[in-house]
Image (cartoon, grey):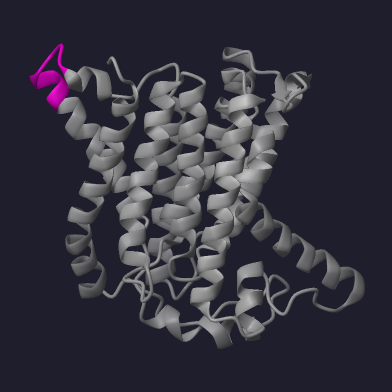
């Protein structure tokens, strides 16, 4: 295609449209079958009742459907399927140019998206039908470790990735340690999925991050990867359209697990493989996710050491609610920070 930007914009737009079109049907199903927790509230990590969380959000869990993340990956899958069918029906046409599934760039993130969505969907199903008890955390962690371990090995053994890019300073060689480092990154990102805790918050953050990485991949001439990221962002924006307060549904695990695990792959593919700095730039572009995961870890460590809480409630966005910020203020400020971080990270990527 003479202008590759259109091979990115067209699938992203289609994903947004398909996401909007499928939502009424999904919503009807979720409300008809009451796909929400039957018992509100959560337990803290130490096994006690999460009093502050239950005060803030406990009742919402009894009336807001789960599994809204289906909109995200469903829109992506429908977009890929439709473009593929049109590609077969009209060979040597524009559809050949905008079909972005390729072995070299998008098979790994696409597969990760599907696996994360499937495992998350199973967890959400158990969460609804078994009184708020989804898959055990240990089971989910095992699946993530196994998947990320295999992908990390593939990066190292098959794709020759053994270094981490450093902005303005080349790269650092770490050899086979790229495997456990990718596993650590995947687990950390999965932990940040708890950002799906306020109406509109996760959609705004994830869409900005994936759009930023679409820009980074485009700058690296990884056009298929850029189109994939933009298409995911289109699906997220369709979800956000209906997740803006008052939310029609929540993303929950089927969305957050799919997005966080896929994001781990994307940031590595825009690093040494793309002669870029995708990993280090995530500390800036993904600052809201980094802060979310870090606040949970800090809360646990601080309470274990001192016996007191560092925050009124973790993760951080709920702390702001607990001290009196309206939910809308928390969400809007997270959006502002996400946009600023995304623009800054993309700017650095183009010159580093």
Figure quadrant of the N terminus: top left
From the viewer's perspective, is residue 47 above or below residue 92? Answer: below
From the viewer's perspective, is residue 33 above or below residue 203? Answer: below
Residue 266: x, y in percent?
53, 33
Residue 192: x, y in percent?
60, 55
Figure quadrant of the C terminus: top right
Residue that protrudes farthest toward the left in the picture: 89
Residue 156: x, y in percent?
64, 18
| Relative horizontal placement of residue 83, taking residue 44 as reference (left or right) | left
Q: Give the residue displayed 60% in from the left and 21% down from the top.
A: 155
Q: Can residue 15 be seen here?
A: yes
Marks counted in the figure total 0
Q: Give the residue displayed 69% in from the left and 40% down from the top.
A: 184
Q: Who is closer to the viewer here, 178 or 275?
A: 275
Q: Can residue 315 be seen here?
A: no
| Relative horizontal placement of residue 245, taking residue 288 as reference (left or right) | left
Q: Give the residue displayed 74% in from the left and 27% down from the top.
A: 166
Q: For residue 83, which quarter of the picture? A: top left
Q: Who is closer to the viewer here, 264 or 209?
A: 209
Task: Reply yes or no: does residue 348 show up in magenta.
Answer: no
Q: Who is closer to the viewer here, 125 or 297?
A: 297
Task: Reply yes or no: does residue 90 show up in magenta.
Answer: yes
Q: Give the residue displayed 13% in from the left and 26% down from the top.
A: 86
| Range drawn in magenta | 86-93
């Amino acid at each position: 295609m003479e202008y590759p930007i259109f091979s990115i914009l067209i699938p992203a737009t289609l994903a947004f449209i398909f996401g909007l079109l499928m939502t009424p049907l999904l919503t009807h199903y979720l409300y008809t079958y009451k796909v929400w927790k039957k018992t509100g509230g959560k337990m803290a990590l130490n096994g006690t009742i999460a009093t502050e969380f239950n005060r803030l959000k406990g009742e919402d869990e009894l009336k807001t459907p789960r599994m809204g993340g289906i909109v995200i990956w469903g829109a992506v899958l429908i977009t890929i399927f439709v473009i593929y069918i049109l590609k077969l029906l009209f060979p040597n046409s524009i559809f050949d140019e905008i079909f972005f599934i390729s072995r070299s760039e998008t098979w790994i993130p696409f597969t990760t998206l599907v696996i994360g969505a499937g495992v998350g969907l199973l967890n959400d199903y158990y969460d609804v039908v078994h009184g708020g008890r989804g898959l055990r955390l240990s089971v989910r962690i095992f699946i993530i470790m196994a998947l990320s371990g295999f992908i990390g090995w593939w990066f190292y053994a098959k794709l020759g990735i053994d270094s981490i890019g450093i902005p303005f300073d080349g790269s650092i060689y770490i050899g086979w340690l790229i495997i456990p480092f990718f596993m650590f990154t995947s687990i950390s990102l999965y932990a940040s999925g708890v950002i799906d805790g306020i109406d509109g918050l996760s959609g705004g953050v994830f869409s900005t991050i994936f759009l930023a990485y679409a820009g980074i991949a485009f700058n690296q001439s990884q056009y298929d990867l850029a189109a994939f990221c933009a298409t995911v962002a289109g699906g997220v924006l369709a979800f956000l359209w209906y997740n803006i307060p008052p939310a029609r549904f929540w993303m929950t695990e089927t969305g957050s697990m799919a997005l966080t695990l896929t994001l781990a792959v994307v940031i590595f593919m825009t690093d040494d493989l793309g002669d870029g700095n995708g990993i280090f730039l995530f500390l800036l572009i993904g600052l809201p996710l980094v802060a979310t995961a870090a606040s949970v870890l800090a809360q646990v460590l601080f309470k274990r050491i001192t016996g007191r809480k560092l925050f009124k409630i973790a993760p951080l966005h709920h702390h702001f609610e607990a001290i009196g910020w309206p939910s809308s203020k928390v969400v809007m400020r997270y959006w502002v920070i996400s946009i600023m971080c995304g623009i800054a990270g993309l700017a650095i990527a183009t010159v580093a």
